Amino acid sequence: YAIRVVSEVLSSNGSTSQGSVCGSTLALMDAGVPIKAPVAGISCGLIQDGDNFTTFIDIQGVEDFHGEMDFKVAGTKTGITAIQMDLKNDGLKHEIIKNALEITHEARIQILDEIMLPCIREPRKELAKTAPKMIKMTINPDKIREVIGSGGKVIQKICADTGCKIDIEDSGNIYIACEDIEACRAARTTIENIVFEPVVGQLYYGKVVRIIPIGAFVELAPGKDGMVHIKDLEFKRTEKVEDVLNIGDMTWVKVSEVDDRGRVNLSRKDAIKEREAMGLKD
């Protein structure tokens, strides 16, 4: 997302724009925004008499008024990120521009090393609580209609429940934004559950939600379950499902098949066998 930083200047006797550059860098780092490198800015003035000229930095108001140039340069230690110039004469010689870039580079390094970086050397590891957070996720474009729902009911409920702003692109990219990162994560989890598709051969850890004489239904994700046939519960013969599993039990299962009607067949004994081969136990 784009970040708009507003600088309120209470008094001016110099380059407020370059002061705003320095202040914005400090504010972004303090807020935990992961900028690539800190940026400082400085202005360069010019007094010229024929072929003779003098450039100077950090010009004040009177120098800006009587001078012939206000050359603003912002950048990092390794490069320039922005240039803006106010010019009153007919043009600049290459020598003047070269000199202006050299002295503004030296000044940027000094501002960074002696003023800004001693205050904060790098962006904070976590975004500030008041900073907007954003999570990007990608889903199968064929699942977009399920996330949106009839008349937008599903997506509107997710937004209402979490307080997030959610944008969905035709490509399947979804952007979830909110000040609260936990709300973003909750919205993401809800969407993941909506678009969840069990993968054949994948192991899942789920809850037993229903038992019938021929097997047990295990919830793989909210609202998405599959059935473990009684013959696939244990390696030995099982007389009753309840001899192995009961409602509310958590168990590992492996997806063995998803039929053409979307029904998911699971195997508990295959999951146990695979986990034991990996040296894992329930």
Image (cartoon, rainbow, N blue to C red):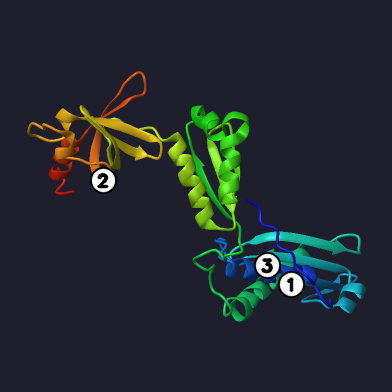
Q: Few, some or many C-alpha atoms within 10 Å of disc 2 (few <14, some 14-19, many ≥20)?
A: some
- Numbered disc 2: secondary structure: strand
Q: Residue 198 appears at what percent x and percent y?
A: 34, 33
**Mark 2 or mark 1, which has the lower sequence index?**
1
How far apart marks 1 and 3 lie (CA) works out to 8 Å
Q: 35 or 63, which is in the foreground?
A: 35
**Mark 2 or mark 3, which has the lower sequence index?**
3
Amino acid residing under circle 3: Ser
Amino acid residing under circle 1: Gly
Mark 1 = which residue?
19
Mark 3 = which residue?
24
**Mark 1 or mark 3, which has the lower sequence index?**
1
How far apart marks 2 and 1 lie (CA) works out to 59 Å
- Numbered disc 1: secondary structure: helix
Please give left or right for residue 110 compared with residue 7 in the image: left
Q: 276 or 267, which is in the foreground?
A: 267
Q: Residue 92 appears at what percent x and percent y?
A: 83, 62
Q: Is residue 117 above or below residue 25?
A: below
| Viewer can see residue 93 | no
Mark 2 = which residue?
250
Q: 203 or 101, which is in the foreground?
A: 203
Amino acid residing under circle 2: Met
Number of numbered labels in the structure image: 3
At 61% from the left edge and 57% from the top edge, which residue is drawn?
A: 132
Q: Residue 201 appears at what percent x and percent y?
A: 26, 32
- Numbered disc 3: secondary structure: helix
At 52% from the left edge and 31% from the top edge, which residue is drawn?
A: 146
Q: Nearer the viewer, mark 1 or mark 3?
A: 3
How far apart marks 2 and 3 lie (CA) works out to 51 Å
Which image quadrant for residue 251?
Answer: top left
